[in-house]
Amino acid sequence: MRRRHFLLAASLALTFSAAIADSLSTPTGKVVLTIAGKIGERNSPQGVQFDMAMIEKLPQHSFTTLTPWEKQPIQFTGPLLRDVLAAVKAQGTVIKAMALNDYQSSIPVEDATKFDMVMALKMNGQPIPVKTKGPLFIVYPFDAKPELRSAVYYERSPWQVKSLTLE
């Protein structure tokens, strides 16, 4: 029985590693996210650039949560932020997220390991248009823990994310 669990775990690890390797190829579509700073991987002089297809190749996760910006709970889907950081071999302690309108948010890297945050590319199963917080939105699972329903974490949830810099 242990051997079967070990083989299953090893198979899942290889699948995840393959997804990460695929996600770091050179973008062929429009670049939607650039990650720079203290990272161990690069696919461009700027750091790691992702097009949407590359982000979609990472393991996808979904959760439904209420946000302070909408009246109804929303299902968010995308890779866990910790998986995005693992893909670029992030080495910093702070993520500086930059939005399309140059809004900046500082997110402790520890949050990405402590909470199942997603780099959402879908809301309620649909791609997120720029006019409604897309194409990428970092979202905490606000309903998962009472501590997450506060201004501190709401301010760490930028939408229209275009870049992350690890410091």
Image (spheres, rainbow, N blue to C red):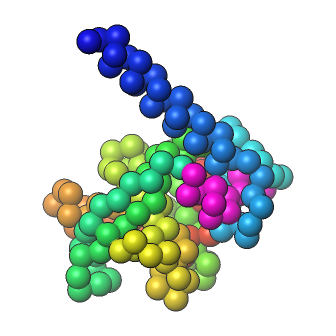
Can residue 73 be seen in this snapshot? yes
Which residue is the extreme one toward the right?
45
Magenta region, residue range? 46-57
Can residue 150 be seen in this snapshot? no
Residue 62 locus on image (x, y percent)? 35, 59
Give the number of callouts.
Answer: 0
Residue 99 locus on image (x, y percent)? 57, 74
- As rendered, which of 68 and 106 lies closer to the eye? 68
Residue 10 locus on image (x, y percent)? 46, 22
Residue 37 locus on image (x, y percent)? 68, 50
Which residue is the extreme one toward the left?
146
Q: Is residue 54 magenta?
A: yes
- As rendered, which of 57 and 150 lies closer to the eye? 57
When the figure is inspected, residue 90 is found, relative to residue 123, above or below; the finding is: above
Q: Which residue is pictured at 37% across the width and 67% down the height? A: 76
- The answer to whether 8 appears left or right of 100 in the picture is left
- The answer to whether 162 appears left or right of 74 in the picture is right
Q: Which residue is pictured at 32% across the width and 69% down the height? A: 75
**Quarter of image, res 117:** bottom left
Q: Which residue is pictured at 47% across the width and 26% down the height? A: 11
When the figure is inspected, residue 136 is found, relative to residue 4, above or below; the finding is: below
- The answer to whether 112 appears left or right of 94 in the picture is left
